[in-house]
Amino acid sequence: MLIPMFVGSAVALSLLGFANGFAVLAVLVFVAGACTTGSQNIAYSFVSQYYRPSMRATGIGLASAVGRVGAIVGPTYGGILLSLSLPAELNFVSFAVPGVIAALAFWFVRAAATPGQEVSEPLPAVADSRGAS
C-alpha cells in the first residue's frame, strides 16, 4: 500500500502546477495531502513490523527522523526554487521527486525481504548477552 500512496502523492503534486479550476485543484490537494500524510503513518507501521523487537524503537526513531528532516528541508527547498524564478509547474514537479524516491526505496526494501523470514527472533548478539547475565 505504501508504494501506490507515494506514487499517488507524486502524481498529485506534479499535477497541481497544471490544474485548471478550483474543483480540480481541491481534489488534487486532497489526494496529495491524504497520500503524503497517510503514507507517513503507514510507514511507521511498516517499520515496526520490519525490524526485530530488539531494534524496533531505533528503526521507528530513524524513520521519524528522516521524515522530520524532510519537514525542515522542504520549506528551504521551496524558497530556493522561488528565488530561481522557475515556472510554477516545475516547482510542483520538483516537490514530487521525494515521493518517487520514497516509492523506489520501499520497492527495494520489499524486494529484499525473503518469504517466511522470521523477524521476531532476537539478534544472535542480543541472545548471547542475555545468556551471559
Image (cartoon, rainbow, N blue to C red):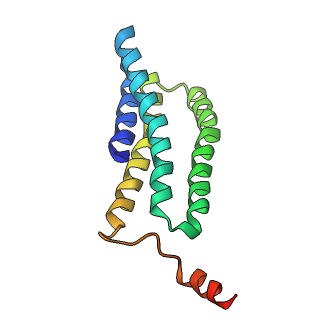
- Which x, y percent locates residue 77? 59, 36
Question: Height in image: 127 above or below 79?
Answer: below
Residue found at x 62% / y 46%:
69
Residue found at x 34% / y 15%:
24
The residue at the far bottom in this view is 132
Which of these two is toward me, 54 or 107? 54
Mark count = 0
Which of these two is toward me, 29 or 50? 50
Residue found at x 47% / y 50%:
45
Asked whether the viewer can see residue 31, the reply is yes
Q: Viewed as shown, does residue 78 lie left or right of 47?
A: right
Quadrant in the picture for the N terminus: top left
Q: In which quarter of the view is residue 100 placed?
A: top left
Q: Viewed as shown, does residue 88 lie left or right of 7?
A: right
Question: Height in image: 94 above or below 65?
Answer: above
Residue found at x 37% / y 39%:
5
- Which x, y percent locates residue 115? 29, 69
Which of these two is toward me, 124 or 63? 124
Asked whether the viewer can see residue 98, the reply is no
The residue at the far right in this view is 133
- Which x, y percent locates residue 38? 45, 37
Quadrant in the picture for the C terminus: bottom right
- Which x, y percent locates residue 14? 38, 30
Question: Height in image: 31 above or below 103?
Answer: above
